[in-house]
Image (cartoon, rainbow, N blue to C red):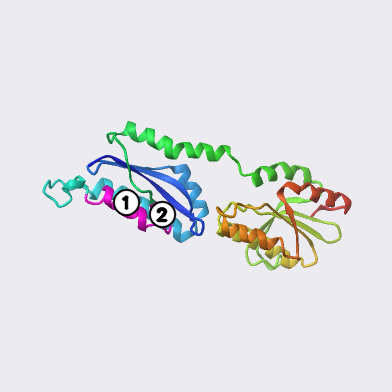
Amino acid sequence: MKTFYSILSVVINPGSGEKISIGLLLSNGNDSIFRCSDSRLSIVLKILDNNSKKFVKDYIKSIDSVINNIDINDDPTNIFCNEGKNIIVNEPYIEYLSKYSKNVINFSKPTPIDLVVDSAVFDVLFAKFIAEEIVSEKTEERIIMSEKRRFFPKVKKYFTVEKEFPANKHTKLLLPAKIDLFGKNGEIVMGQFFDLEKSANNIKSDFFDFDQIAKLHKNSIKFLISFEPEKDKFPQQHYFWSEIRRLKRHTYVDIYEIDSIIKYAKENNVIPE
């Protein structure tokens, strides 16, 4: 059997098929090496819900267990002899997983490679397909995050930045909330950034925070700050973006026009609350 590799990815947006590569399998049907990136896995676990987190962790443990403890068959006459001694970790089975295991976590279609299975070869492939992606992701900060870092110091004289509200009888909140900008000028003035390249579940959480506080201050001035995400890549997020621009209960501000909030704060004597 020829050597092949397959990339293990976690699907973080089933609607768009968006996924993050977290691990690599290198095998020839007799010997296999598998490794996950701790950095990439930590990113994924922050995004997923609790049930999906557990599933991903258990799935990875099961792969390690299969390779190291179970998938060893020394019988040369077994029916899988053409695929090597491994009954489970072989190219046909990984190809099967690549087609039918796409809900949360899945392997890519096996790619043949004319190399031996050893740690040196694996390290090169891992650096190429997994580790280098981590470096890229750290250096390419999303635009909304860089704009928030630039903007927050400029508005501290007008707003409390990232104000936290506990859940209790005094605040009347069911769950703790955090608002990016919170000030007053006789009435409450608030603003919230929405990163529409995050998962839909994370956006729901951000919007819930904003909506809790907004409902307590119905007569407040509300700025909702975001940007248009790529429709093909983020269809659910794009729909959210198109809808929030139509709502009348707040003012939508594009990320590239956020200095208009400073102008409003100056002209209307907004102070931190």
* As drawn, 157 above or below 115: below
Q: Which of 265 and 241 is in front in this view?
A: 241
- Give the side of residue 134 with respect to residue 204, left or right: left
Report if residue 53 lies within the magenta region. no
- Give the side of residue 212 with respect to residue 34, left or right: right
- Which numbered marker is on residue 145? none
Q: Nearer the viewer, residue 157 or 101?
A: 101
Q: Quadrant of residue 84?
A: top left
Question: Measured from the top left, where is residue 152 in percent x and y?
Answer: 73, 45
- Location of the N terminus by quadrant is top left
State the residue at coordinates (57%, 58%). Answer: 235
Q: Earlier in the sequence, mark 1 or mark 2?
A: 1
Question: Measured from the top left, where is residue 115 in percent x and y?
Answer: 29, 34
Q: In which quarter of the image is residue 96?
A: bottom left
Residue 127 seen from this side: yes
Q: Which residue lies furthest to the top in this view?
A: 120
Q: Nearer the viewer, residue 161 or 27?
A: 27
- Which numbered marker is on residue 95? 1
Which residue matches tag 2? 105
State the residue at coordinates (57%, 37%). Answer: 139
Question: Measured from the top left, where is residue 101 in percent x and y?
Answer: 37, 57
Query: Which amino acid type is shown beneath numbered disc 1?
Result: Glu
Front position among marks 1 and 2: 1
Give the magenta range.
87-106
Report if residue 88 lies within the magenta region. yes
Q: Residue furthest front?
A: 232
Q: Assess disc 1: are there few (<14), some (14-19) or many (≥20) residues with their C-alpha within 10 Å of its C-alpha.
A: some
Question: Measured from the top left, where is residue 125 in percent x and y?
Answer: 38, 36
The span from disc 1 to disc 2 (Cα, nearest Å) is 14 Å
Query: Which amino acid type is shown beneath numbered disc 2?
Result: Ile
- Location of the C terminus by quadrant is bottom right
